[in-house]
Image: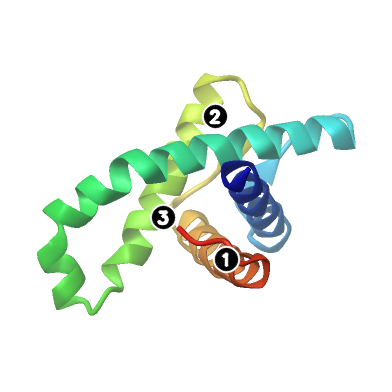
Amino acid sequence: MKVIVKIIVIAAALWVSTRVVDGITIGGDTTAKEIGTLLAVALIFGVINALLKPIIKTIGCAFYVLTLGLFALVVNAGLLLLTSWIAEQLKLPFEVVGFWAAFWGALIIGVISWLLDLILGIDD
């Protein structure tokens, strides 16, 4: 149940980022298709974060220390770009254009996910 709620939280954060950041778009003829795409992209983003982020943190631990954790924003932007690429390969209408769109989108997704996790009491 917790995994489903977490996917919905990420989908909500992705939706906000599509509305706020130029360069992050989601397609869909209907609201239902848009919601389906958001949930699919949230699942992809969650799997990528679960699999790659610990590896990247381990390998790039010196960068995290040297930048006082700011390197995490660059990593999250890269993971969002990877999510966009995988969504494109799967023919999902989700696109992130450029590093800065990914950077701001990842920042928004991180903050909104954290807030919703805090409100809903979800522990990682």
**Residue picked out by circle 3:** 77
Give the residue at x 67% y 72%. Answer: 119
- The quarter holding residue 60 reads bottom left
| SS state under label 1 | helix
- The quarter holding residue 35 reads top right
Tell me residue 118's x, y (percent): 59, 72
Q: Amino acid at mark 3?
A: Ala
Label placed on residue 2:
none
Cα–Cα span, label 2 and label 1: 19 Å
Residue 40, above or below 53: above
Q: Amino acid at mark 2?
A: Ala
Residue 32, above or below 120: above
Q: Which residue is at the front of the view, 39 or 96?
A: 39
Cα–Cα span, label 1 and label 3: 11 Å
* Whether label 1 touches label 3, CB < 8 Å: no
Mark 1 or mark 3: whose residue is earlier in sequence? 3
Would residue 121 be seen by someone viewing this image from the given angle? yes
**Residue picked out by circle 1:** 108
Q: Which residue is at the front of the view, 9 or 59?
A: 9
Residue 70, above or below 102: below
Give the residue at x 52% y 57%. Answer: 101
Mark 3 or mark 2: whose residue is earlier in sequence? 3
Give the residue at x 70% y 33%. Answer: 37
Would residue 28 be seen by someone viewing this image from the given angle? no
Cα–Cα span, label 3 and label 2: 15 Å
Relative to 20, is 99 on the left or the right?
A: left
Tell me residue 43's x, y (percent): 56, 36
| SS state under label 2 | helix
